[in-house]
Image (cartoon, rainbow, N blue to C red):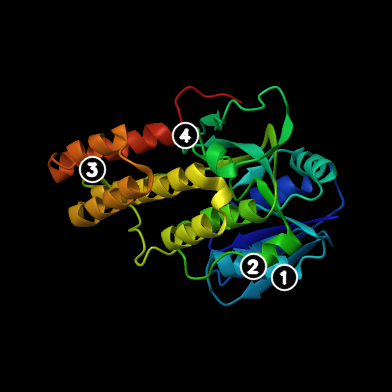
Amino acid sequence: MISIVIPLYNKASTIERTVASVLAQTVSDWELIVIDDGSSDNGPALVNRFDDPRIRLVTQANAGVSAARNHGVELAVSTVVAFVDADDYWDAEHLANLGQLVNQFSGASIFSSAYFMVDEKGQIRKTCLSDKNKDSETMTMPNYFSDALRGDPPIHSSAVAVNKLAFSHVGGFPLGVKAGEDLITWARLACVGDVAYSRRATAYFVVPPISVNRNRSVIRRPQKPDYVGNELAGLSLQYNQYGASLRLYRGHWHRMRAVLFMELDERVDCLVELGKAIHISGLRLRDVANFGLLLFPAGARAKLLSCWRQRHVVSANTTQ
């Protein structure tokens, strides 16, 4: 058996599609735990309409996605727990794909497939991964941080399963972290065990539309203090075998924060993050470009960054 956890919070418009994609799996030996994180819409009622004894709906007071996922893992019967978000969905072969990884690499801490990204227009693009082991459909990543720096993020929360014991060992998803809680969890798991990976994409990540207000994207302000950055620094000290690749990964995190602060026109914070990135992983060409963007008027700069992000997330050249 494999356990599946869906964190649910006000996703009535999409939760039926997500649950239906689980019911459509070619593998039938599973349990589905839907954690209703204090929804105020009728999403939980829609879940209850599915008449299947393998589905459990558990309600908790609103505590955030990390608490919901952790609660689901605690209730899971299986030693392997897969996740899917309430607005994403799976191909019918997804659990079979993950099951092949579990059988082949049973000692891994993470089991993940490649995935498709779907934009608000329905355009679909498969994630672009490192060319390493391109002739092998299944593999382990000897250095997750190195692979994560090339192409798209290799792991997404709707395409991954975890070893329950390893997940508990690293403390699960950190509570109170609003951005990057998944990133730091995959990083911790990659440090304590192998990352088993299938290049066959069987999960679909529905990219949230980018809201724009007066030609500027409405984005979430990076958290302070920077919990994820501090934790990555701790991992770098504790697991020095990853050396340069983990330093580059940490630099990448601070560059992402810098761009968000830049788009918010918070230049001092942007410069602070760029300074951290350069100190950790050296000056990069993108840093020079970011310094140049800071010279643009705020409105023009925000519009350029918004257009870049929309093109970057889902390419117009779709593949499936």
Tell me: residue 285, above or below residue 135: below
Secondary structure at badge 1 equals helix
Q: CA distance from mark 4 to mark 1?
A: 37 Å
Q: CA distance from mark 2 to mark 4?
A: 33 Å
**Can you identify the residue that label 1 sits on?**
74
Secondary structure at badge 4 equals loop
Q: CA distance from mark 2 to mark 1?
A: 6 Å
From the image, which quarter does the N terminus lie in?
A: bottom right
Residue 85 seen in the figure: no
**Residue nearest the observer in this picture, 292 or 241:** 241
Residue that appears at 60% across and 62% down: 8
Circles 4, 3 touching at the beta carbon (< 8 Å): no
Judge depth for marks 2 and 4 and give the one in front: 2
How crowded is the residue under tag 2: few (<14 C-alpha within 10 Å), some, or many (20+)?
Answer: many
Report the amino acid beneath label 3.
Ala
Judge depth for marks 3 and 1 and give the one in front: 1
Q: CA distance from mark 3 to mark 1?
A: 42 Å
**Can you identify the residue that label 4 sits on?**
121
Say which label, 4 or 1, has the lower sequence index: 1
**Residue nearest the observer in this picture, 249 or 310:** 249
**Residue 298 vs residue 21: left or right?**
left
Give x and y (percent) for residue 183: 52, 53
Circles 2, 1 touching at the beta carbon (< 8 Å): yes
Report the amino acid beneath label 4.
Lys
**Can you identify the residue that label 2 sits on?**
70
Residue that appears at 20% across and 40% down: 291
Give the number of the disc on residue 302.
Answer: 3
Judge depth for marks 4 and 3 and give the one in front: 3
